[in-house]
Amino acid sequence: MSKKKQPKAKLKSKSKQKTKPKHKKISPEKLLRQFLDNAAGYEFIPAAIHTLKRALAGNSGNRENILRKNIQKIKGANTFLQKVISVHDNINYESKRMVFSPKYLNLDLKKEISDDEWENIIHRSHKLKDAKVTADMVHKLKKKDCVCDDNGGTDGTPTFTPKYKFGLTFDHLWCLDETDPEWGGDDEPYVIFSIITDEMVELGIPAHVVRTPIYGDEKGSSVNDNDNQWYSSPKDSRRPETGAENLQLFGFTGPRTIPSNVLITADCFEHDYGDTTQLMENIKTAVTVTTSIVGGIGGVIAGAAGAGGVALAGGIVLAIYYLISLALEDDRIGTTMALALSNHIAESDTTTSSGNHMYKLLFKDESATYEANLLLTRHPN
């Protein structure tokens, strides 16, 4: 009798071959090296960590008292922050001293950072956002107590009736370079956004946090960069493949006026085994506590992302990035990106006949590159 032929085993599709994370988690020491190229965090981050430690230890102070109240409003915030502080404290001191000011790394927990000192830290942070951490930069910083602009800050609150309402939505995500090694399977990316306004900070309202679908897990097929014609097509690199996701960011439920400056942060991740719900709470915590620390000083968000619009932000967003990175489970792609909006910026960016503007947030590191597209729309008030 002839043997019955066995059916050939089906090859798994490329998107199903992924069995382990491709993106290596960044070590705390490697994370610190990123701050050598942006001196905006030199004083701001260790000063924020110091204030946060004081709050968690029960020390009294204006910011510390506000911080404790806001921490209680967010699920799991205390646990997350205790973990962040523990990881920060366990990083080699010399590694931290290379990128952060020893003045605030070594500051006695009994000492509160005054309002005047925080104002100078913030202004210096804005000035240093394009500088590298060098011995010359540190020397110049020590010679000046303040490198403030003469005109100070502004809270950006309109003194007139706004002509327009605005809406901001996440539109679509492009995969420009898939996570290496590409043979390990397609990516399952997602982006988490936080939204907070100066008004929310003043009222003690935590940041609003939303995320995109996990593409390839919760919605549609997984993603690749379309650089292999044998197994991919142009649609593989865009999510959603056509049309818009229409995920509401600013406006929350629909277009609205901009009563005070808005800060939107965005973080892109490759989904492995992390708890995305807890990660969203961690990001909410990082954004809320960082903005709470500097609340009331010339408008928290004024200048937080440069002159407004998409920018690598100053100390505020660098501190948010640092706090999130110290307690990650899923793998980050690139750094925290920021978009700052005021009524003036929104009007200026929507002067086209369509009344729309597309912002592009680029998440890029040595392993992958993604671009999130955010659509700003203008509507009559």
Image: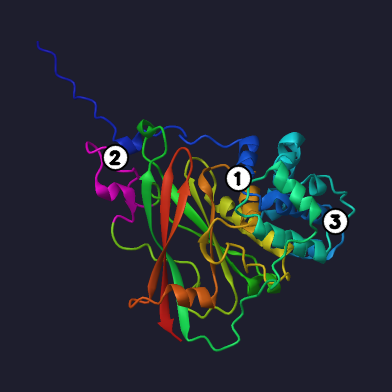
Question: How dense is the environment of label 3, judged by Cα within 10 Å: few (below 14), some, or many (20 and up)?
Answer: few
Question: What amino acid is at disc 3?
Answer: Gly
Disc 2 is placed on an element classified as loop
Name of the residue lying farthest toward the bottom: 161
Left or right side of 203 for 345:
left
Between disc 2 and disc 1, whose residue precedes?
Answer: 1
Is residue 65 in view? no
Q: Which mark is residue 227?
A: 2
Magenta span of residues: 219-241
Could you classify mark 2 by the number of other residues whose Cα lies within 10 Å: few (under 14), some (14-19), or many (20 or more)? Answer: some
Which residue, given by chain and number where applicable, does mark 1 sit on? 37
Main structural element of the magenta stretch: helix, strand or loop? loop
Q: Quadrant of the N terminus?
A: top left
Which numbered disc, 1 or 3, marks the residue closer to the eye? 1
Q: Which residue is mark 3?
A: 58
Q: Foreground mark, 3 or 2?
A: 2
Q: Is residue 222 magenta?
A: yes
Residue 90 placement, left or right of 235? right
